[in-house]
Image: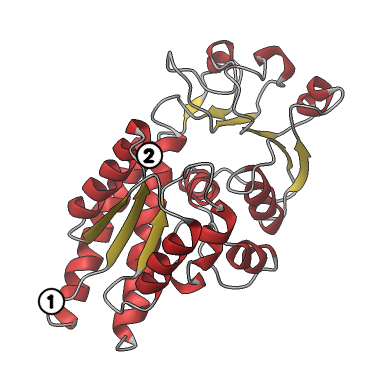
Amino acid sequence: MTAILLDGKHVATLTEASMSERVNALRERSGGRTPVLATILVGDDPASATYVKMKGNACRRVGMESMAIELPASIKTNDLLRQIDELNHNPDVHGILLQHPVPAHIDERAAFDMISVDKDVDGVTCLGFGRMSMGESAYGCATPQGIMRLLEHYDIALSGKHAVVVGRSPILGKPMAMMMLQANATVTICHSRTQDLAQHIASADVIVGAVGRPEFIKADWIKDGAVVVDAGYHPGGVGDIELGPLQARAHALTPVPGGVGPMTINTLIQQTVQSGEKAIASGH
């Protein structure tokens, strides 16, 4: 058995083609308006700057606009909140992304929650998470929503399956578990302090590695025929799961890199397009 490769780069490219058509159609209907994603970068962290640049490039590939806002690392929380609120009230902005992490002196949760739920295309607000968990309309957190889209593209059924999510972060592990529960999976949430972790993982039909430690999850913990999703990325091109031996044993797996990563940015752009379509269609 050779594992099916869950190729996020391929799926993202396919989706960009359809999004370009949607953006073009919206431009024609609205007299030239397109969805706009505002990105906020606080400080000069090189990795964060690279991620923001990648998101701007993704906007341009589908014909969207991006608005890059760069703020000094010394900015106070209240000043950042005012900047976000201005974007909330700007009718030409349809999505707002605050690049994580922000400098330690800033109240990051307050900043995330200042983003209007209608423009929370990265799915980071408490209100958005709560609405998603209750099955109400909201933009899903970009990485787990990207994983759900990837599984759907490859017809990976979740209903009735046992999914084990290893990780409990508010922007990955927790929303991932809620989304899989909504898809009728039976979900176990584990983390780095879980006792008998290998035993929990051994029973998983679907395993999601989101613990943030390189190859923390060992291949021999995972049963034959499982679906393996690795949401980690570390120096040396490894993820959170020891993937090598699973190529011949898993039913399907995400490569690292090229699996989950491209789907995260792609989902952010897709949700900005959706937000733009809603706002422009309603005349806002």
Asked if residue 171 is positioned above or below residue 259 in the image, the reply reads below
202 and 170: which one is in front?
170
Residue 102 against residue 125 in the figure, above or below:
above
Q: Residue at x 34, y 48 (%)?
A: 72
Q: Is residue 123 something one can see in this rendering?
A: no
Residue where numbered disc 2 is placed? 262
Picture quadrant where residue 46 is located: top left
Q: Position of residue 113 (x, y in %)?
A: 56, 64
| Number of numbered labels in the structure image | 2
Residue annotated with mark 1: 32
Label 1 secondary element = loop
Quadrant where the C terminus lies? bottom left
Which picture quadrant has residue 13? top left
Judged from the image, the secondary structure of the residue bearing numbered disc 2 is helix
* Residue 136: image tag: none
Q: Mark 1 or 2 closer to N-term?
A: 1
